[in-house]
Image (spheres, rainbow, N blue to C red):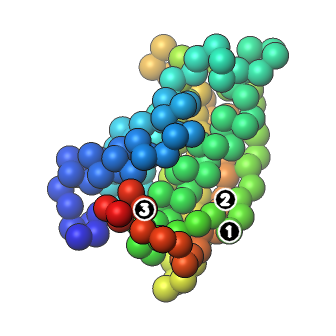
Amino acid sequence: MTLSEMTPERALAFANQVIAAQPFSTLIGAQFTEITPAGATLRVPLRDDLRQHHGFAHGGLMSAMADISLTFVGGAALGPNVLTSEFKVNFVRPGTGEALVSRSSVISATRRQAVTRCDIFAVQGGQEKLVATALGTIVLADVPPSAADGG
């Protein structure tokens, strides 16, 4: 069953099952909050241990969120056995607040590759400010079964 065939609740539960099987994603506290046919929303609480020396969200955290988000929507388009081929991140402004939220979508997909986009926002008091934007290429890969496909 593909994500588009699942109910929104089931798709969200599946997405969170996938990232719960990834130790790094659980380390940073990543959790999907919305999965729709148009894309995915990922949230990470902005804890002190995820900030850099000026108190802003660490660029590595935002890059990890981009990688997780870009790859997930790429996998939704191509199937579960995907890997990130490349991605780039533009940091727009320092991330401050209580959480970071990324919203990702597929720009274009073929049978073997998807070009995906993700915008990352800092959340403070219910207000969001764009802090980074990313573009990535996700590809089908010959990898063994994983939690992503129930293996």
Ranked by sequence position, the earlier of labels 1 and 2 is 1
Most extreme residue toward the bottom is 111
Q: CA distance from mark 3 to mark 2?
A: 25 Å
Identify the element where label 3 is drawn. Answer: loop
Q: CA distance from mark 1 to mark 3?
A: 18 Å
Which image quadrant: the N terminus?
bottom left
Mark toward the viewer: 3 or 2: 3
Identify the element where label 2 is drawn. Answer: strand
Tell me if I can see residue 151 in this picture: yes
Q: CA distance from mark 1 to mark 2?
A: 11 Å
User: In this picture, is 125 found above or below 92?
Assistant: above
Residue drawn 18% across the image and 56% down it: 7
Which residue has dot 1 on it?
A: 85
Which residue has dot 3 on it?
A: 146
Q: Quadrant of residue 94?
A: top right
> Three-letter amino acid code at disc 2?
Leu
* Residue in the foreground of this view, choosing between 63 and 125: 63
Identify the element where label 1 is drawn. Answer: strand
Q: Are marks 1 and 3 in contact (CB under 8 Å)?
A: no
Ranked by sequence position, the earlier of labels 3 and 2 is 2
Whether residue 60 sits left or right of residue 119 in the image: it is: right
Q: Are marks 1 and 2 in contact (CB under 8 Å)?
A: no
* Residue in the foreground of this view, choosing between 143 and 64: 143
Tell me if I can see residue 123 in this picture: no
> Three-letter amino acid code at disc 1?
Ser
Whether residue 19 sits left or right of residue 37 in the image: it is: right
* Residue in the foreground of this view, choosing between 149 and 100: 149
Report the disc number at residue 135: 2
Mark toward the viewer: 1 or 2: 1
User: Where residue 96 appears, x then y in whole percent?
Assistant: 65, 19
> Three-letter amino acid code at disc 3?
Ser
User: Where residue 84 appears, x then y in whole percent?
Assistant: 63, 64
